[in-house]
Amino acid sequence: MIKIKGVTKTFGVGADRVNALTPVDMHIEKGEFIAIVGPSGCGKSTLLRLIAGLEDVTDGSIDLGSKDKKRPVGFVFQDAVLLPWKTVAENIRFPLDTSAVPRSVSDAKVAELIALIGLTGFERALPKQLSGGMRQRAAIARALADDPPILLMDEPFSAVDLLTRETLNDELLKIWEQTGKTIVLVTHSVEEAAYLGTRVMVMSARPGRLRKTFKADIPQPRSEETKRDPRYLDLVSELRTMMREPVL
Ligand SMILES: Nc1ncnc2c1ncn2[C@@H]1O[C@H](COP(=O)(O)OP(=O)(O)OP(=O)(O)O)[C@@H](O)[C@H]1O
Ligand SMILES: [Mg+2]
């Protein structure tokens, strides 16, 4: 589904040159939920932006297994970037406006997404009338609007409180189960990574590279019970240890 081969990214030239990523190789299967953790500045956002095609690779290649011209990805940013003058429903519809989707079809799709992400009753609200968690829900719905097989999420829940975050995690898992999307999510939280991921990838900084991949061998579907499962607790502690260890 996603084949990343020898991808590097360098920003700037001369003295300002930054090697953001040294060769990264990664194979992600259809329907996987990949969580990526790593220290600040290790290139997590850069990697997502490269997969999304928002940025060009310096070297290497990224194959998304699609021959369409349109990139088959939806992107959710850390801070929900909603258009402030558009309602929730209009924001979610936005990616469909630019494609040749008939209005009746996009109406049905928007209604379905609003139900899926639990914003029923807020269709006509403006972003400023929503809480942070609700804005992030709307951003997720918008990323899903044109039904991309891949969903990329860059620290989507870091700006909401812990309880809301746990609720959004469970909702995201439900969406993942219902839609079969391939999800790549960046987070600073090792607990969140272990709870959500089918695999957890740890990156290291300077220069950014993939340090280790852990298979999250924890039963699905995940639930509150997962948080007491020794396999989850072991993975969290392994991840934490690795994040603390200096890279040799
Ligand atoms: N447009 C840019 N121009 C120059 N340097 C950049 C640019 N974007 C990122 N970088 C550099 O590339 C490196 C990786 O940045 P990136 O934002 O991918 O890190 P990150 O892992 O997402 O960090 P954080 O956890 O803080 O979000 C950093 O050293 C950053 O300064
Ligand atoms: Mg980042």
Image (cartoon, rainbow, N blue to C red):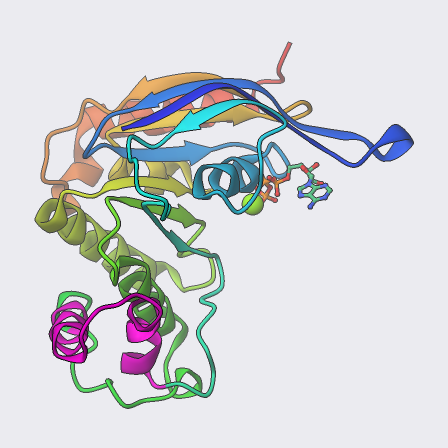
Q: Residue at the location (35% across, 76% down)?
A: 91
Q: Is residue 29 left or right of residue 240?
A: left
Q: Where is residue 27? Give x, y as percent.
A: 34, 20
Ligand 2, seen in the image, is in the quarter at top right
Towards the viewer: 78 or 239: 78
Placement of 172 over or under 247, stated as above or below: below
Q: Quadrant of the N terminus?
A: top left
Q: Which residue of the protein is positioned furthest toward the top in this rendering?
A: 248
Placement of 80 over or under 148, stated as above or below: below
2 drawn magenta: no
Q: Is residue 58 left or right of residue 68?
A: right
| Image quadrant in which you'd find residue 180 | top left
101 drawn magenta: yes
Q: Which residue of the protein is positioned furthest toward the right in this rendering?
A: 15
Q: Residue at the location (20% across, 66% down)?
A: 117
Q: Residue at the location (32% across, 81% down)?
A: 90
Q: Where is residue 184? Give x, y as percent.
A: 35, 39
The secondary structure that dominates the magenta segment is helix
| Image quadrant in which you'd find residue 235 | top left
- Magenta stretch: give its range: 87-114
Q: Quadrant of the C terminus?
A: top right
Q: Where is residue 113? Give x, y as percent.
A: 17, 68
